[in-house]
Amino acid sequence: MADENIKEKKQEIKKAKRIPNKNYAIKKRLPVRPVEGNNVIFITKKTNFKAQLDKCCDLLTRGEKEIILHGLGAAIQRCCNLALQLETLFSGACQLEVNTGTVDLIDDLEPLVDDLDFGAQVRHSSSIHIRIFRTAMLGANQ
């Protein structure tokens, strides 16, 4: 009896997986970006980590009061690592505020056959937003 229930659950899990349809080509849209600005940085897996770190350091040393890092999906780990590196470099002068969430991503379905209509599907992806703000002036005596 228990074996039958386990087999049924495994079959349900296999059915729940998304199987790509061969009649459609999937075109992934860019995610919706929050407020743009000089102090808003979007972290990706493709950008050089050292370049991202240097850009954040430049912003903080030039007098920016806060910077906001945004990461999606696989870039979450890199975003966290970058924030921790900045906290270490500016020891005691900066603090972190972390928010996590889920973002809806939309994929366009373009038909490969003339008989079908265009469509869209929604995916969900994890996201992180890290606010790094100065608590003390850089170079000031503490």
Image (cartoon, grey):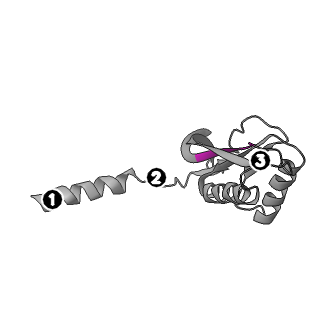
Image coordinates of residue 50 in percent, x first then y, are 79, 65
Badge 1 marks a residue whose secondary structure is: helix
Answer left or right for 132 relative to 97.
right
Front residue of 60 and 113? 60
Mark 3 crowdedness (10 Å alpha carbons): few <14, some 14-19, many ≥20 = some
Relative to 41, does residue 48 appear above or below in the rendering?
below
Dot 3 or dot 1, earlier in sequence: 1
Mark 1 crowdedness (10 Å alpha carbons): few <14, some 14-19, many ≥20 = few
Say which residue label 1 marks.
4
Badge 3 marks a residue whose secondary structure is: strand
Q: Magenta residues: mostly which secondary structure?
A: strand
Answer left or right for 19 relative to 82.
left
Q: Residue 69 shows which numbered tag? A: none
Badge 2 marks a residue whose secondary structure is: loop
Answer left or right for 53 relative to 20.
right
Q: Image quarter for residue 33?
A: top right
> What kind of residue is marked 3?
Ile
Taking the magenta stretch, the answer to whether it contains residue 130 is: yes
Image coordinates of residue 89 in percent, x first then y, are 75, 60
Q: CA separation, marks 1 and 2?
A: 24 Å
Front residue of 16 and 140? 140
Dot 2 or dot 3, earlier in sequence: 2
> What kind of residue is marked 2?
Arg
Most distant residue in the left direction: 1
Say which residue label 3 marks.
41
Q: How many marks?
A: 3
Q: Residue at x 56, y 47 (%)?
A: 125
Q: Residue at x 79, y 58 (%)?
A: 52
Q: Is residue 2 visible?
A: yes
Most distant residue in the front direction: 142
Say which residue label 2 marks.
18
Magenta part of the protein: which range?
127-135
